[in-house]
Structure formats: structure tokens, C-alpha cells
Image (cartoon, rainbow, N blue to C red):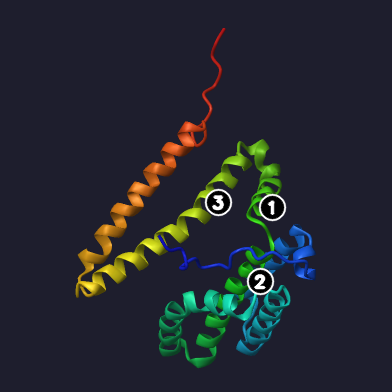
Amino acid sequence: MRGQGFLLANYVRGSSLIHRTPLWLKFLVVSACGAASFLIVEWTVSLAVLAVVCSLFLMSGAGARRLARAIGMVAPILVVIGLFQWWQLGGPTAARIVLNVLVCVVAASVLTATTPVQDLLDGVVALASPFRRLGADPERFALTIAVMLRSIPFIAGAFSDVRDSARARGLERNPRALVLPVFISTVAYARQTGDALAARGLGEPEEPDTAE
């Protein structure tokens, strides 16, 4: 099953300055890019910010091909969004919205391309730890993200395989031939994942100790 459809760049080993940057600072940059997408009102500023985050990605040594892949995955959606916004609000606003989305995608790709998954999950646990007093479970939250990171490539790969199979049979325009096999594969994968977590005692809330 192919997983090339994953939206964000996979981790690339390296010793660049971006790799050595503390995780908290990378989180801060990604958060700032997300906030900027709501605050920036000029498309030229969005373009400048996009150029900066793309430069950071290339400086990490992850390569232009991975950058193009991360952008290419969202390109069809952004084309539709851009055309609709251009029709509704005009060209400058459409360009700003599309560029801001690209800023968030590339910034997140910088994070995932320069941070091992385990370090990323440990950072999530550390960030969520203050919410433990409110009843949150940081470890369970990190586990959820880990399952998500593993599941997205599987589902994307399943769709690609089913689409190729349907095309070979001349059924690429048949929604049932595309959706139903992917749905069945996804449900089976979810059940296998749930069984694996249950076998390791994970995924279920701990029962309170009521023994006298």
C-alpha cells in the first residue's frame, strides 16, 4: 500500500541549523505562521512570508522535490479555493488566502521534515502537560496524533491503489468503484489498529480503583 499521498514532508536526517533548532522554537514558528494567516491582509506580505518558509525548508536539506510534493498535494484544492475567492472577493484577496494556506503547509512541513516523529510526540506531551490538572491525558493525546500520522498515508495510498485498479478496468468514473473499496480498507485498518492498541493495553481509559 502506497503512502505517497501524505500531506506533510516526512523526516529527513540531517545536521542543518533547522534540524538543531529547539523543538519549542519550531512549534512557535508554526504557530506564528498559523496566526499570520489570519492577520496578514496584503498578498505581497503573504508572498514574502511564503518565500521565507520555503527558504527554511530548502536550508534544511529536505530537497526541492519534497517541497514540490507538499505543495502539489494541496494545489488542486487551492486552485478551486482561489477561483471561488477571486469570483467572490477579487484577485488580491484570493491570492492572499491561497498564499496564507501555503505558508501554513510549508511551515508544518519544515517541522515534520526536521524533527523525528518520536521527538515531535514527546514535544506534544510536554506542551499538553499543563492541562493534566484539567483532566487531560497528554500521553493519550500524543498517541492519537501518532495514529493519525500513520493512518493518513495508509488511506491516501489505499485511494491511489483503488484509483489505479479502477482505471485499469475502465471504472475511474464510477464513484462506487472508488469509494467502497477505500471505505472497506479503512474500516479494516481501523479495526486492526484498535485490536493492536487493545492488545498492548492502550486506547482504553483506566478504570477507577473501587476496591475497598
* 92, 103: nearer the viewer: 103
* 71, 30: nearer the viewer: 71
**Disc 2 residue type?**
Cys
Where does residue 23 sit, x and y in percent of width and height? Answer: 74, 58
Q: Secondary structure at mark 1?
A: helix
Q: Which residue is mark 1?
A: 119
**Disc 3 residue type?**
Ile
Instruction: Name the outermost residue toward the top.
Output: 212
Where does residue 162 sit, x and y in percent of width and height? Answer: 30, 65
Left or right: where does residue 150 sit relative to residue 126? left
- Answer above or below: position of 139 versus 15: above
Q: Which residue is mark 3?
A: 145
- Answer above or below: position of 133 versus 96: above
Q: Which residue is mark 2?
A: 33
At x 43%, y 77%, the residue is 77
**Disc 1 residue type?**
Asp
Sort mark 2 into few (<14), some (14-19) or many (20+) by Cα contacts within 10 Å: many
* 99, 179: nearer the viewer: 179
